[in-house]
Amino acid sequence: MKTKAVRIYGKKDLRLEEFELPPLQDNEILAQVVSDSICMSSYKAVMQGADHKRIPNDINLNPTILGHEFSSIILETGSKWKHKFSPGQKFAIQPAMSHMGTLNAPGYSFRYAGGNATHIIIPSIVIEAGCLLPYSGDAFFPISLAEPMSCIIGAFRANYHISHGACKHEMGIKKDGKMALLAGAGPMGLGAVDYALNCDRRPSLLVVTDIDANRLSKAASVFTVEYAAERGVQLIYLNTSEIDAVKTIRDISDNTGFDDVFVFAPVKSVVEQGDAILGFDGCLNFFAGPIDSKFSASLNFYNVHYSFTHLVGTSGGNTSDMAEALQLMKEGKINPAVMITHIGGLDSVVDTTLNLPFISGGKKLIYTNISMPLTAIDELGKLSTDNNIYKGLYEIVSENGNIWSDEAEKYLLANATPV
């Protein structure tokens, strides 16, 4: 079977190509990809090429398929897996397989398994690792967003607090505690707000900061303070671009500081801001992954010793985190569609990935079997005058607060031009 896919050959070298997939082996699964959400991790992989820990050294000769936040349908199952998987099943992939003793991952390391493709072959190691997770919901885009949501869930679980006297780590964010999401109005921050307001360990106070007024306004319109109050959470949005951020944020906490602080931007000043607003036994989670291997920031070790402040970092979730994300989405308890600001086809992947940090907005969702330029959902109204697909999409999303939906996805897949 032929596939079209975006493959990485080296630093800043991405190519959309058509090629033949090898014959399916007994321990593999053939699948059709439907959607893939482009992640900053893919941009980092493209910038680093073979220097990236998950990218093989020989990509110049054996390129791999990029994209690790994808949804697929099983087309054919090798004999080894017929008892467990069937054609027609939708599934998500958890790319992280560190529990198998490897950094290899779909969307980085494999020649025939990645999200930016029309068709792929899932290798045996991924299936054996338990990283193929069936999904019975109607739409495909939630599956693509299950991976980023799993990263958020994993981060919330990785935070810890200390049971003093017993010196025992109590895992997870502090229930009814004070939480701050710094640089938190981007797509991953929005996902974190959604989870914080709907998980079973909600904070009593949630402060979300950013320096972009438009992002904050969008976040406040999606997750209103009234919506948060209904869930027992005092939600405050704060623009820190022209204020003394540390003083202002600490004042909100009655100068006692915060139990859980998440940093969503790899910026030295933001990390140090997070450290400065920690309260007694406060946990700082450095969520954002830097490109610079020498990235560093100052930490107040006086507070580490006397106030028991501490630091954690997480890089991705695990299968348990993803299973929770899929279940919460299926039950309608979280709506990661709020993270999506752009849609496009497979032919828009190369330019989008190479320029991702310079494209405003949140998640860029790619439907891999269609041809479509990267398009901002907020711009559909302007584009609808001379394009019937855009007009139809605009009519749907405008009735839903310009948020992507099952209905919009079905319309797009039924009417778009195949790639």
Image (spheres, rainbow, N blue to C red):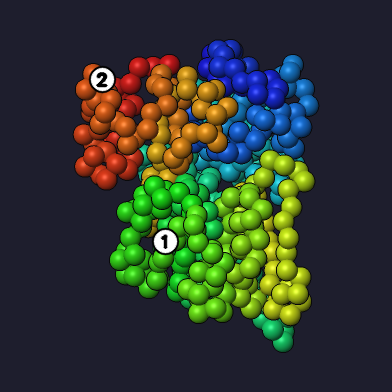
Residue 316 location in percent, x, y? 62, 49
Instruction: Say which residue label 1 marks.
Output: 237
- In the rendered image, which quarter is residue 393 located in? top left
Q: Quadrant of the N terminus?
A: top right
Q: Residue at x 28, y 25 (%)?
A: 383
Along the polypeptide, which appears first: circle 2 or circle 1? 1
- In the rendered image, which quarter is residue 129 located in? top right
Three-letter code for the amino acid on which mark 2 is drawn: Asn
Residue 133 location in percent, x, y? 52, 44
Instruction: Say which residue label 2 marks.
Output: 387
- In terms of secondary structure, where does tag 2 sit? loop
- Residue 388 is tagged as none
Three-letter code for the amino acid on which mark 1 is drawn: Tyr
Label 1: few (<14), some (14–19) or many (≥20) C-alpha neighbours in 10 Å: many
Residue 298 location in percent, x, y? 73, 60
Q: Nearer the viewer, mark 2 or mark 1?
A: 1
Frontmost residue, 315 versus 322: 315
| Residue 105 visible somewhere in the drawing | yes
- In terms of secondary structure, where does tag 1 sit? strand
Left or right of 129, for residue 5: left
Q: Residue at x 60, y 28 (%)?
A: 66
